[in-house]
Image: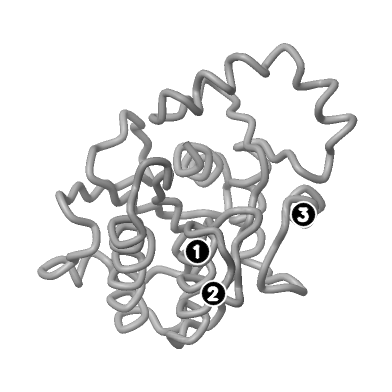
Amino acid sequence: MVGQGALRECLLDPEVTEVLAIGRNPTSQQHPKLRQLTLPDIGNLSGHEAELSGFDACLFCAGISSVGMSEEEYTRITHDLTLSFARTLVQLNPAMTFVFISGMGSDSTEKGRTMWARVKGRTENELQRLGFKSVYVFRPGFIQPLHGIRSKTRLYQFIYDLTAPLMPLLKNRFTGYINTTDQLGQAMIRVARDGYTKTILEPADINRIK
């Protein structure tokens, strides 16, 4: 869902000249500056090095819910896959900025009681040490999908549909905890291009970026 929003904003931004969308399934988007690379395992980029070279930034939006998953399984997808992908990119593009979508409440100490927060925090920490020009971690709160964007997780989409009529009220009361897919995509592009004063951005930081 976040990736759909990021892609939309990249294609709309006149300063973004080329986009390579990488995923397990192709996107339905068509655009002159969009290329797509569909892989069964995005953690294994072997043989695609030429296609992955020459980029200024990576907006890494892949993720999965931890509901019903063991720590081992969640670590394999959230940590191991992300780091494998990032290690390949940093070798090919050492001057790249890497923007990682994490989650509000992630545990940078890696020692808390909440499994997903520990795994996210470990992933954040190890990304910072890989050697990219810059790494920025986005920790969004509740995400409001716009422009027909839908979550692939049925439970999440049910919640979004249920809360949609209340969203104006919720935004007024919880403005520091709600981000839209537009805000996330635009903020990721701007931070990748211009940097930011913090490497870890909470929901309020994301909403402040224009």
Q: What amino acid is labelled 1 in the image? A: Lys
Within the image, what quadrant is residue 85 found in?
A: bottom left
Q: Earlier in the sequence, mark 2 or mark 1?
A: 2
Callout 3: 10 Å neighbours few (<14), some, many (20+)? Answer: some
Looking at the picture, how far across and down is residue 73, in whole percent? 28, 56
Looking at this view, is 195 or 42 the one in front?
42
Q: Residue at x 35, y 63 (%)?
A: 75
Looking at the picture, how far across and down is residue 169, in whole percent? 85, 21
Numbered mark located on residue 120 in the image:
1
Indicate the secondary structure of the residue bearing disc 1: helix
Callout 1: 10 Å neighbours few (<14), some, many (20+)? Answer: many
Q: Which residue is mark 2?
A: 110
Q: Are marks 2 and 1 in contact (CB under 8 Å)?
A: no
Question: Which label sits in the foreground, 2 or 1?
Answer: 2
Separation of residues labelled 2 and 1 (CA atoms) = 8 Å
Q: Which residue is mark 3?
A: 209
Q: Residue at x 36, y 59 (%)?
A: 71
Indicate the secondary structure of the residue bearing disc 3: loop
